[in-house]
Every structure is written in structure tokens, then in C-alpha cells.
Image (cartoon, grey):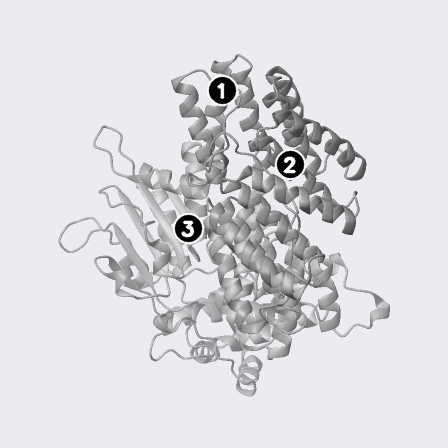
Amino acid sequence: MIPRRADCFQDRAVSRELDRAVADGGTVVLYQVLTGMGGVGKTQLAAQYARDTWDRQEADLLVWITAASRSAIVTGYAQAAGEILGADPAAPETAARAFLAWLEPRSGPEKRRWLVVLDDLANPADLRGLWPPAGPLGRTLITTRRREAALTRGRKVVDVGLYTPDEARAYLTEALADSGRHEPPDQVAALAGELGHLPLALAQAAAYLSDTGLGIAAYRERLAERALRDLLPDSSALPDDYPEPVWAAWALSVDRADRLPPAGLARPLLELAALLDPNGIPAAVLGDAAVRTGLSRAAGRPETTGSVGADEVEGALHVLHRLSLVDYAPDHPHQAVRVHQLIQRATREGLADARLAESARTAGDALVAAWPEVERDTALAQALRANAAALTECAPHALHSGGADGFHPVLLRTGRSLGDSGQVTAAVSYFAQLIEAADDRLSREHPDTFAFRQNHAYWRGQAGDPAGATAAYAELLTDQLRVLGPEHPETLITRHHRARWHGEAGDPAGAAEAFAELVADQLRVLGPDDTECLISRHNLARWRGNSGDPAGAAEAFAELVEDQLRVLGPDHLYTLSARTNLARWRGEAGDPEGAVVALTGVLADQTRVLGPDHGHTLITRHHLARWRGKAGDPAGAVRAFTELAADRLRVLGPDHPQTFATRHSLASGARRPVTPPERRPHSRNCSRTRCASWVPSTPIRSGPGGASTS
């Protein structure tokens, strides 16, 4: 979506320089980089250039991406690949690579003329490996505050500065005239100079003057009376002699917004938005009960009157939008609120440390509340992760508070979401960083530190390192036995994971023995209907089958399903998983046709409850394809594995262990009928080939008041 043309857009001299697409030597300019400080109008210039290029029919494809992070660039490329190639943006890295390959120049008759605009590039390193290819018919335009040589060398650089005095006066005169205002030219010129000829500051001032009816002379007096707030972009993009009056216009606009009904809510709402992703904040986050309670406190409302209503939050967002402090688009719920990064920074710098910390914790609470347990909507999950990352960057000390409260639960929820989305390697790295931070601020024996270590070990195993996961769990178990004791729930959880990954590392009999001992202890300590005990029974049955007793595994799963239906219900994640494994082990015990029938039923229920792209749904499809082959339909099995391989590549990416599992099964099925021996020894590679399956894990908690993850 190209930003709309600004009201009273000025045709500046720099626009004509940008339009010169042919260099002095006569060659076509393939890369143009607009540099300059925030607020000088780079985005508007790029948007006008893009529209003109399209209107002149000089491009057959136009792509506009807000490039504030590497993830945003990849997501934009993936969306383009979805619209052009039919690729699914749910696997963004794969789709992005396909899009870049499509942009490559062709030697045949097909000529592809394109323009890619990467707006507001925050870090040149984010483009490493993502530069659009060079070609005679393709052009790339970048706007950024950065001026590193790595970005500008060998490319046409257009420096975008402030309005000239004539441009600033013309802008203010035209903007005020649109509202029926005609101010003295000397006052217009004086105000333009006092605002530093900065386009964004002039726009804010014009909006304030139009809404309030305040005269320029009175406005200038207020500017003289108010202390100016420093607002500085990244130092590498800041002109040496840049004047710094821009926050004055924003401060006056915020004051005005805070006085408009619902009074007292615009400012604290902007303070919350200033801590989140500038490219889009989901509506559910700013409308959460935690935010409404925080706004009530900030507005000084007594508890007896209740918290701020959802309609009041909506009204405050409209006020902020009206005064050009945010862009509010409720029709795009995942990215409903956008805030310019400079406004965000100015807002944060004006907060006292205590207020910043309180706002950060409120934002974190809202993110956790808005995060669905099952991430069926991958776009929402990506938006929540982006907002959590922005919050962590803006206020790390507020989330890493230490002390008795520990770390904020949003940190754990973010890591879990990374892993659940298939980014298991990223999850391992993320939790390693959390462990390092916890070591600095918490004791090694704090519950949050234990939780981070559990998650780090878990995703290490999911990333294909079961031996490393086993060793990490063994080290953690030693510490928990010493600190918590053998019967503490967290100690039992670690025993569970250590047994599971011990089996994945190649010792199924040892895993079955460890789970048998664990189930006995859990029955005694927790009781037979405790969820963790049911999960351990699931894994005991699984490893019993992997140890060579499929009939015993099927019998154990049949008993477990009955108990889970009674305790958890038919649509619970764990019940569905147990049904999948019951069907699988009945097939292993000699009933492949029955396995196909049962798995077909489970797949229908999982698709209804979890969605077609959920990891557990994909695992059931893997088992169903396998048992089709063993039931005498090798061609059907190959077709099913072919479809599943494409979906796992799209959802999980090419390097996920389960993608390897399906590719292995497909390759085996393509060479021969899918009828492996009746009994096959368990191997170290089981989790990546024949035995690819989802195994429920006991909750990994974040400590007191924390969210749990499975």
C-alpha cells in the first residue's frame, strides 16, 4: 500500500533529481537511495516517484515495502510472491527467495519491468542477501536515515534536506488556506523558520492551527514559552547543523488531543503505542483490559468508576489520528495503529523512568492477553512477535526487572511463538539470550532462569539436537533436585523432558524405563487426572512402542484416550494427539487399514479445531500417508507425501526436521512401494524419518504469574 499523497504536497527540487533515472554516463540508474533525517519527506517523495512511474507505464510491477526490519522486508517479498507466483507467505523466507529469483532478468522474449521501493530502511544489514537483482529493466528505490558506505557505495544517492524557505512558506500558506485561514505572510514565514522548515513539523503545526483556530502569532508565543524536547534519529543519519524544534509541534498536538474527549486518554495511549512496533499494532493489543486499566490509572480515574471502556479507547485513537499523531486503520486489525518512529522516540524520551517502566509492563500484559494459545492466524502471530521485539528493544530493563517478580511473561511467550511457527533455530538463539540476561539480573536458581533453560533445551531438541537437549536437561535436573527437591512439579517436568530427548537420542528402552518411573511418582504426587501425569502416560506408551512392543503401546494409548476424553474433552490438543498415536500403534501392531480409518477421523477433527497448517495437523497427515502405503495404496501414499512436503516446506521451511522427515518418506516411496518391514529398530534418526510425530510436553512455566508453554 503506497502512502497517500500528502495534503498540499510540494513539488520540490529534489523530486526532479529523483526523476533523472539516467546517470551522466548514459546508463540507467538501477539503485537510488534517498537519505536524510526523519521527517524531511523521503517517503512522500518516493511515493510520488512510484505513482509517476506507474502512471507513465514505465513499470509492469510496483512493490512498496516498509523496510523497518529484516522481518518486514522478508514479509513484504513473501506477500509479493503470493500475489505474483501463488506462493504462500506463511513460509516467508522461502517465498521471499522465490520473489527475488523472479525479479532476475530473463534472456527470452518476456521482459519484466519493475520498481521495488524499500521505505524507511532502518539498518543496512537487514538487506544482506535481500537486495533486488540488478537488471536493465528493474529499479530499486530506498529511503533511509542511514548513510553508511555499505548502503550508498556504487548507487545513486539523493540527499533529502529540509524545505527551502519558499517551499515551507508555500506549504503553510496552502495548508491553512484549505481550512479557510489566511495569515499574514510575515507570520507564516516566521513560523516556518521557527519550526526549522521541517516538513513533518509544519504538517503537525498546520493541523493544530486548523483544529484549534489559534492564530499563528499566539501559536508562536506558545512555542517561545515552551521548552523544546530533543528528538534525534540515529546519529549516523543526523545532519551536523540540524535544528531541533520538531517536538514542539508534537507536544502541542498531544496536549490538544489529551484535552479532547475522551479527555486524558490520548497521551497515555500514545505512550503505550510509542513502545510497540511502528509498522503496525494489532487493535486487540491496545483494546485489551490491561491497557484500559492502565489508562484509567494514568488518567487519574478512581477505581470506583471502573476502567476505561473499549469505546473510549476507540475515541482516543481517532483523536490521535485526527491530529496526525498516529495512523489509525481499524479495517486492518493486525496493523491497526501505525506511529512514526520519530514521534515514538520523542514520546519515550519525555517519560520518567517509572512511567516508562509502567507503560512497558502494561504493553507486555496486553500482548500476552492478545496472544492466542493456538496460532491459527500466522499474520497475527507475526505482528505480535514484531510488537514484542519492539517493546523489548525500547524498554528491556522494564521487562528484565529482576527481583521477586522476575522477567515479564511476554518474553517467554515470544520465544514459544518463534518455535511454534517453525523457527526452531531462532527459538534456540532467543532463549540463549534470555538465559544470559537472567544470569545477569536473577539468580541461577530463580524460577524464570529455570524456565528459560527448559525452553532452550526443548527447542534445541526440536532443532535436531536431541543429544544436546538431553545433556542440557540433565544439567538442569541436577540443579532443580538440589534447589526444589525431587517432588516439585518443575523437577518432574524436567525429568519428563530429559526422558523424552534421551529416547530421541537413540535409547527408546531407556526412555520407556524413565517414563515408567516418572509416571509412578506423578501418580503418587499429582494424582491420576493431573494433566502432566496424562502427558507422561502418553510418552510412556510411545516409547514402549518404539522399544518393540506396538501391541502394548496401542493398549496403553486406548486406555489413555478414554481418560483424556473424560478429563480434557474430545477437542483438547492432547486428546487429539493421543488418538493419532493410538491409530499409529494399532497399525504397527498389524492393522494398517484400521490405522487409515482412524487417522482420517483424527485429521478431520484437527483441521476443524487447529486449522490445516497447524504442526499437529501436518504430523497426522504424515502418519496417514505412511499407513496408506502400508495398507496397499503406495500411489496414494506418494501423492499424499508430495502434497504434505509442499505444505511443510511452506509452513516450516526447508531446514525443519519434520520437512526432512516428509522428504525422506517421499523419496523412499518414489523408489519403491511404501511397505517397510513390519518391525524396524528404532534409530537415532527416527524423529527425522519414519517416526516423525508430535509428542505432548508438560508445561514449561515462567515462574510466579508467568505464562505456560507446551
**Considering only order in the chain, which callout, 1 or 3, is on the residue closer to the N terminus?**
3
Q: Which mark is residue 610?
A: 2
Give the distance between the C-alpha atoms of the residues marked 2 and 3, in whole angstroms. Answer: 28 Å
Q: Which mark is residue 677?
A: 1
| Residue 346 x, y percent position in the rendering | 52, 73
Q: Is residue 289 something one can see in this rendering? A: yes
Q: Position of residue 683 (x, y in %)?
A: 47, 34
Q: Amino acid at mark 2?
A: Leu
Q: Residue furthest bottom?
A: 225
For badge 1, the amino acid type reads Pro
| Up/down of 156 relative to 201, above or below | above
Secondary element under disc 2, as helix, strand or loop, is helix
Q: Position of residue 520 (x, y in %)?
A: 73, 45
Q: Is residue 649 left or right of residue 439?
A: left
Dot 1 alpha-carbon crowd within 10 angstroms: few under 14, some 14 to 19, many 20 or more: few
* Tag 3: amino acid: Ile
Mark in the foreground, 2 or 1: 1
Q: In percent of the image, x 18 and y 54: which residue is there?
A: 23
